[in-house]
Image: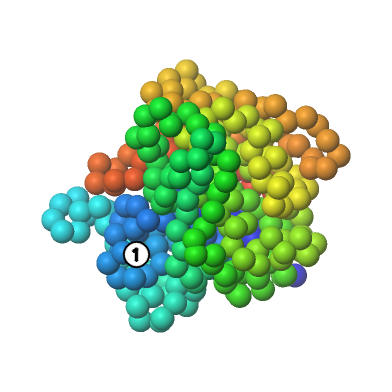
Amino acid sequence: MKKNILVFGGGTGSSTLLKGLEKLDDVQITAVVAAFDDGGSGGKLRQQLHVLPPGDPRVCLAATSPHEEILNYRFQEGDLRGHTIGNIIIAGLEKIKGNLSDALSEATKLFQSPITILPVTEDQAHLFVVLEEGSIVKGEDTVSNFPPLGELSNKKVVKVELTPKPRANPKVLEAIKKADLIVIAPGNLYASCLSHFLTLGIPEALQKSKAKKIYITNLFTKWGHLQFTSKDFVESIQQFCFLDYVLVNDAKPSKKMIDHYAKNNQYFVEDTTKDTKKPVIIRDNFVHDTQWKQDTADTVRRESIRHRYDKVSEHIKELL
């Protein structure tokens, strides 16, 4: 019987992980993606067409499809500059089908992806964070992509909210019940991770679930958690979801990579987690050798360093 793996995350972190997981035998994979993006191509389509943002699900679809190049092709000029073919197709399918879940079901068939992709909610909602001195930063794009906040840029985030409160996608709640293993992918802590747990019904479903729960810590910090170590990330997740295992990178990236990130006020995540009975800490070299390049037509800043999906999937296979 196939094991059910459920992955919570956003675009880049989840898609990297899915590339490894889809190679495992006897597994059925469901990717649950955040639905609050308001920047870049997906944000424009959301605003103009009144659909849910297609960007994160498109990245996951492309990562598991033999047609990755087509789905990720980004127009370089004209009115379509910045848009990807995949985003436009998914947005169109949502208009036809009436909801994003059914649109993605159709898209996985069209593009021969073996996984199921679901938005965490079918409701329209927006992300915002409250800083320690009371300022409010609104919008997933602003929260995720280094807002030009001047003296506020180093302030601590004390609260994360979704407004209006979105309800969990019933198909996601059903997938949680069936899951044997639940993985929280690396990614922006607030936009890609905690936003799932702020969706009504998700924390309760996770609490009831008997599935093993795994979290993969980030490699570098981002705005809002610039001083975070691996211990801080784990504690943030455990406020909402009790973990059984945590995968922590114990290899240092190259000086070139560290210097590249430092220019954007980002820093390598130090391993400060202590070995415990629960969650069990699993350490390995999870740093991918490849440095990804930014598409000049993409208005959203992408991560240039990512996890080694082969290493991550090896450990997950052992935990099934």
Q: In the picture, which quadrant includes the N terminus?
A: bottom right
Outermost residue to the right: 277
How many tags in the picture?
A: 1
* Left or right: 310, with 213 as reference point: left
Residue 54: image quadrant is bottom left
Outermost residue to the top: 255
Q: Tell me: residue 63, above or below residue 268.
A: below
Residue 174, given in percent of the width and then of the height, sits at 67, 73
Identify which residue is drawn at 50% across, 40% down. Answer: 134
Residue 262, given in percent of the width and then of the height, sits at 43, 23
Q: Is residue 101 visible?
A: yes
* Left or right: 55, with 10 as reference point: left
Residue 136, given in percent of the width and then of the height, sits at 45, 45
- What kind of residue is marked 1? Arg
Outermost residue to the bottom: 97
Outermost residue to the left: 78
Helix, strand or loop for disc 1? helix
Identify which residue is drawn at 40% across, 37% down. Answer: 146
Identify which residue is drawn at 29% across, 59% down. Answer: 44
Can you identify the residue that label 1 sits on? Answer: 46
| 61 and 242: which is toward the camera | 242
Q: Tell me: residue 142, above or below residue 304.
A: below
Q: In the picture, which quadrant includes the C terminus?
A: bottom right
Identify which residue is drawn at 54% across, 36% down. Answer: 132
Residue 266, given in percent of the width and then of the height, sits at 47, 28
Residue 218: image quadrant is top right
* Left or right: 51, with 1 as reference point: left
